Image (tube, grey):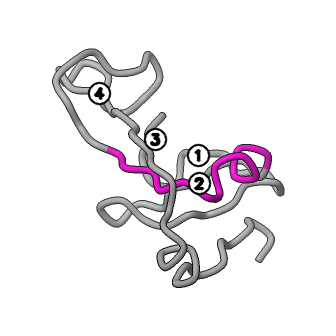
Amino acid sequence: MCYPVGDLMLGSADVRLGEIAGASFYMSASQFAYWQHTKLIIDVVPGRGGMFSLENGEGVRFLTRSRMYTPEELAALTPVETVNS
């Protein structure tokens, strides 16, 4: 789901993974525990967006792809930020 900047209600268990087009990208800590060894690639493709997501009604949707990080990529990663950081 994509929300306008400032509209996402963050919880103490959310982690900030980075930015997409200047907007912070968050995931819950439990999801991150599962995906932490995976590179997530977020694309915009033609289709119908999520009902409550920013792209709804625009004729596009977000598509998440993934692959495992290489050992070199894992070594170069910086720690994620929790909301309380």
- Of callouts 3 and 2, the N-terminal one: 3
- Residue that appears at 64% across and 49% down: 35
Mark number, residue 61:
4
- Three-letter code for the amino acid on which mark 3 is drawn: Tyr
- Residue at (45% x, 54% y) in the render: 5
Disc 4 to disc 1, C-alpha distance: 18 Å
Q: Say which residue appears at 42% left-offset and 29% top-offset.
A: 53
Residue 46 pos. (x, y %):
16, 23
Label 3 vs 4, first from the N-terminus: 3
Which three-letter amino acid code belongs to the residue tagged 4?
Arg
- 17 in the magenta segment: no
Indicate left or right for 78 with 33 as reference.
left
State the SS at label 4: strand
Residue wearing tag 2: 26
Which of the two marks, 2 or 1, is nearer to us in this view?
Answer: 2
Residue contact between numbered discs 3 and 1, judged by CB atoms under 8 Å: yes
Question: Given the image, on which type of amino acid does mark 1 rest?
Answer: Leu
Q: Residues within 10 Å of mark 1 (few under 14, many from 20)?
A: few
Q: Which mark is residue 55?
A: none
Amino acid type, residue under disc 2 in the picture:
Tyr
Magenta residues, as a range? 30-42
- Taking the spot 83% from the left edge, 57% from the top edge, the residue there is 12
Whether the residues at callouts 2 and 1 have beta carbons within 8 Å, the answer is yes
Q: Quadrant of the C terminus?
A: bottom right
- Disc 1, SS: loop
The residue pinned by badge 1 equals 8
Residue, disc 3:
3
